[in-house]
Amino acid sequence: MLVVIFRDALDRRCVRRLRAQLAGAPVPRHVVIAMDVYTDGPRQPAGRTGAGQRYGPEHLDAVLGWCAGAGIRRVTVALGRSSAARYPLEMVERVVAQRLTHPAHRWRLHLAGGLDALPDATRRALWLAEEVTGSRSAGYELTVAVGSTEQLDAGRSGQDMVYRPGFRQVQFLRALRAYAMRATMPA
């Protein structure tokens, strides 16, 4: 418990310092969050979830806020087709229903890829959210993409960053700092 309190206090201090360092720095136009049951946490016995399965959907709202705060207006949540059938998608449904469709939320949802791999309830929740958010014009675009690793990799541009869902804000800001340093290096 004490370790968590210390880490959180240190993270808050680092976040303030990193935000100051990033003021005016170039940021990527697009961030990809790759969710995969096999890489987001340790494999668990049937019926149990790993770290990425638990934190991915719940963490998404915070990550969207970090992206918006940094000036990143395009985010893709990539869910591999092989994972879609095993992923605890009721969490995705709940996050979409409770957060993304809320009128105060600024992100517009787009759907891509093999949505047929998703359970009917999840697909309906995503379609409804896409419809509800379709008229938003704040310029923030969230794409939920379901497909094979090769399809998702092919859709990425050189202007994006890829993350796993369990990362903390300080890790996100450190990655932005590294991106900014690479972007300003002479060719």
Image (cartoon, grey):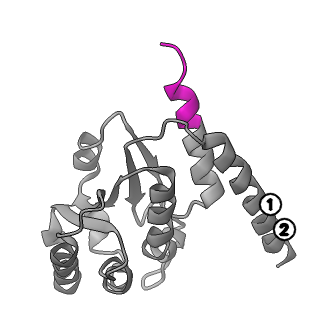
Q: What element does badge 1 sit on?
A: helix
Magenta residue check for 25: no
Magenta residue check for 181: yes
The residue nearer to you, when weighing 133 against 164, is: 133
Q: Could you classify mark 1 by the number of other residues whose Cα lies within 10 Å: few (under 14), some (14-19), or many (20 or more)?
A: few
Q: What residue do we see at 29% from left, 56% from top?
A: 139
- Is the Cβ of the residue at disc 2 closer than 8 Å to that at disc 1? yes
Give the number of callouts. 2
Segment colored magenta: 178-187
Asked if one can make out residue 72 in the rendered structure from this viewpoint, the answer is: yes
> In the rendered view, would you say 33 is above or below 83?
above
Residue 125 relative to residue 50: left or right = left
**Residue at the limit of the structure toward the top, as seen here:** 187
Q: What residue do we see at 15% from left, 63% from top?
A: 114
Residue 7 relative to residue 183: left or right = right
What percent of the width, then of the height, locates residue 169?
61, 59
Disc on res. 6: 2
What residue does disc 1 label? Answer: 10
What percent of the width, then of the height, locates residue 30?
36, 46
> In the rendered view, would you say 145 is above or below 94?
above
Disc on res. 55: none
> In the rendered view, would you say 121 is above or below 85?
below
> In the rendered view, would you say 116 is above or below 128?
above
